[in-house]
Structure formats: C-alpha cells, structure tokens
Amino acid sequence: MYILGIWDGHDAGAAIVEGNRIVAAVNEERLTKKKLDNSFPKNSIKACLEIAGLKASDIEHVAATTTEFTKTMERIFPKSKEYYYYFRRRKMLRPRFETFQHHLKYLLTSFGPLPFCKEVSEAILRKQLRALGFKNFKIHFVEHHLAHAADAAFASPFNKALVITVDGLGDGVSGSVNVFENGELERIEAIPAVDSIGIFFEQVTNIVGMRELEDEGKVMSMADYSYPFNFEENKLKDFFKVEGLKIKAKYSPIAQYDLLSRIAWSMPREQFAYMAQQLLENVLVKFFTNAIEETGIGDVAWTGGVASNIKANMKIRHIDKLKRWFVFPHMGDGGLALGAAFYVNYELNGISKYLFNDVYFGPSYSEEEIEETLKKNKNKINFEEVKEPAKYAAELLKKNYVFWFRGKMEYGPRALGNRSILAPAGDEEIKNELNLKVKKREWFQPFAPSLLKEDSKKVIKDIKNRSDVDKFMTMGYFAKNNVANEIKAVVHIDNSLRPQMVGNENKVYRELLKEIKKENGIGIVLNTSFNIHGMPIVCSPEDAIDTMLKTKTKYMIIENFVLELK
Ligand SMILES: [Fe+2]
C-alpha cells in the first residue's frame, strides 16, 4: 500500500512510503526554485509519483498535517501565505507597521486547531488533489508534533527511545516528549505554543536583522564571535525556566518580542546572539536531562526546527545520562510530509520502522538525459566522459573547488555528496572565494566537512564510544587542536565543526574521499550545498549548469561527465 504524505506550509513537500520503504521524498523549493516555498506542493507530489512509477489515481491514502487556525486561514486565503513568505524573507522594504504585523502573527499562531479547521482544511486539500488527478482517496490528518515525532522515532535505529520534538510551533504546541516502545509512540508531555523556545530564537533572528525561519543557523554561528559571558551575566537568563518536562516562558510572545528588541538595542549583535544561544543551550540541556531521568531512557531521538542548532545538539550529546542519539536529518517542517506518511502507515499497517541508511530520496537523471542537456550547452562548456570520476575530482580538488552532482537528490537541508560543492579542506583562500564570490554568504558562516567515517577519530576530539557516527551533518563536534590547523576551511572560529561521516551509503563519494586520503593522510573535503546563497539546492542537470554559468565555475562533475567552462 502506497501512502502519500503532503505538507503545504513552510518548506512544503511530499513523500511516498510503501511497506517499510521510503520510496520518494522531495521539497517544493527544489522544483520551483523558491527557497523554502510554502505553496501547495503540487510539483513535489508529481515528482514523487514519477519516482515511484505511479499515477495519482493509484494513491488511496494521503497523509496531511497541521490544522491550526492560521494554517487553515492560509489554506483559505493563499495570498496571505504568499505575503508572509515575502515579508519573512524581507523581499520588500520594511513595512511601516512591521512590529504590528509580528504582534499579529504571535497572537494568531498561539491558537491551536479550532473546531471547523479540520473540515475546511480537508475540503481545500481534497480539491487541490483532485485537480492533480487523484480520484478515490482518503485524507488522514496527523497532528504537527506527532508527524515530527514519527520522523525521529521511526527513522531512528532504536527500538526503544525517548523522542523529543522542539520547534517554533505547530497545532498550538512547541515541543513534545514521547516514549517509543514496542513499535508504539506515546506522548507524555506537550509544551504549549506560548512557551515556545523556538519562537524565542526566531524572534532573536529577526531582531538581529536576519530572516526568521531561515537564518537561525547564522545567529548560532555569529554567537561564537562574542566574548563569552557567564550565564549569571546573561540578560536573557530568566526568559525561560524548565520544570520537570515543561518549558515555561516568562513573557507572552508579544511582550517577549518587545523586550528582546529593547535589550538588543543596547549591545552589539554578536553579544545578543551569544546570550540567546547560551539560553537556548541551557534550557534544552535541562529539558533533555529531566526527560532522560524521568523516563529512564538514555537513547534519545529528536527533531523539530530547533534541532537544526548543532551547537545545542552538541551540548545535549554531552549529557551524562544520554546513551545513544539520533537527530532526524530533515528536522524542520520540511520533514513533515514524510512524518505524516510514516504515522498513517503505522495507523493503517502497523509499520513503525524504516530502513534509514541515507537521505537520497529525490529525483535522479539518466546518462541520456544528462548528455542531452550537456549538448545543448556545448558552446559554453567542454565535456568528456571519464571512467573514474572520483579520481578525477580528487585531482581537481588539489587546487580548485568543484561542483559535484550524482544520483538521487538529498532530502533535507544538507547536501551529502550528491548535490555538493567541494573544496580542499585546508585551503582558506579557496574557502573565501567560495564564500564571497560563489555562494555569497556572510563572512562568519563556516563550512562543514565530509570525512571518511573511519577517520573521524583522527580529526575530532570529543567523540565518545556511543552513537557518534553522523552520516547526516546534524551534530556539532570539536576538532583536535593539532588537526584544526590543517583543515582550517572546514572548522569554525572556535574549532567546532559539523561533519558528515561517510560510510558505505554513498560509494562513489567515499571513493573520492579515499583518493584525497592517499594524498593528505585524512579523507576529508569541504562540502557545502550546491546552490547560490538564498537559492535552493540544485535538483536537475539544467539547474547545475545554470549555476555553473552564473558563478563562472570552472569545473563540474555530473555522474561520469567532467565539465569545463570554456
Ligand atoms: Fe514544526
């Protein structure tokens, strides 16, 4: 039985599961080129059906999520959703009533689902699906945090685990504590939306002049440029407290926003970012510690937008009583389509475990399709087919950055060796070129490495003998002092890093790292997502070539083709 999951909000997308297999999963932004697209995911649905080899009329069960008041209103008035998209991304001059608009947002989003919401949402989604050719199907709604929790629990390697979700909000909830045991997921606590630590961090992001729901990671990186404070000196320290399994906010979201703005006004933004990050880490460590102690379960899986904060994840990883950990790689709302499909597959078929060895669930392209695209561009690009693309890339990577495109596109925010830009891990000059000329990012944003799984201990100092093998770039670590100097392009100012530890899940990428190891002694490379800043990761060969031309990049490898700009 095929189940289609859909999500039509922030970072919309679709996914198809069948049995204990993830057949396809894609986000709308990759297909529409509108980063974190929040429209109805019609392109993702079509792409998933194509990957699965199905027609719309073959699908009998659709899993949807989130029927809160604001989401339902957005379904009724899609223009309001579009307006918020451009407002949030600051694709306009600052509106005169910007503060009022934020207040309104915090007020309206604190409502959970109201009685009419589900029926209205279902009627609208049904109509949209019918327009795509769906015929006899049932729509099942999965509550927002249940969809998040299903992602973390069912994709984790654990049979018994503590499952924690923390995000901005969804369906009136901003976090949950769950126990996953004997294939069943039971919620033991929910944090109300008004106590959201995710909204707190979103507000901080906004106040330091960045885009909420998008640039929270930049705030985290910027925090490391502040001089350190004791927690006692932290002006935000009493904004939240943790009591048992509850996180409690001192202020309402509106009062909090105003007070944060006033505090931020009195200090440089890196200090403000530092205080916010420190508070977040403090709250999460207490919250997770309490949950581990209360349930007595040391294997923890977590997700939700806040789980993208790898520095906070690192602090959680170091909790003494935590045994093994798993962070779901598509932690934001972009992962909800899969989580909803997971949960409905559990309800209908009792399936709550998946083979989750990689995240290559997106479209791929045949040699013929690629060659055809290359021929169209032959006046701008030279290309040839090679037998060993990994070897070829390793040679180029001695002195260049290289665009690297293979196989199925990654699901989630990280490029993991199929749609990646690669560069030497020790070359700061190339790193700066990448940052400023190619990707056009802020100067303080660090790059991350991919490294051979077996070389992790050579590079990282705080690996413990637990589950510290991260295939998905979801966790922060510190580099060993003697190695940090050799891999300057992939460590942050404090020598922290967010590695992808590559095992057998990506064979050709692994070969490439092994080639690099022959030269340097460590199989490591700078790996950043294949996109220009502000754009989604590329999906098709056309997108890739377009990006190559726009950035005047000299080398790209698509499958077995080596491309050189003329
Ligand atoms: Fe969420």
Image (cartoon, rainbow, N blue to C red):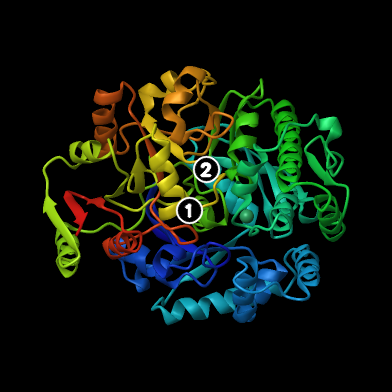
Dividing the image into 4 quarters, which one contains the N terminus?
bottom left
Disc 2, SS = loop
What is the three-letter code of the residue carrying label 2? Phe
The residue pinned by badge 2 equals 328
Q: Is residue 458 left or right of residue 549?
A: right
| Precedes in sequence: disc 2 or disc 1 | 2
Tell me which corner region of the image, top left, top right, bottom left or bottom right, holds residue 400.
top left
Looking at numbered disc 1 in the image, what kind of residue is underneath it?
Asn
For the point 30% across and 33% down, the residue is 504
Any mark on residue 345, and which? 1
Mark 1 neighbour density, 10 Å: few (under 14) some (14–19) many (20 or more): many
The quarter of the image holding the C terminus is bottom left
Give me the C-alpha separation between circle 2 and circle 1: 18 Å
* Vertical side of 519 occupied by 401: above or below: below
Q: Is residue 18 left or right of residue 68?
A: left
| Above or below for 39 versus 417 | below
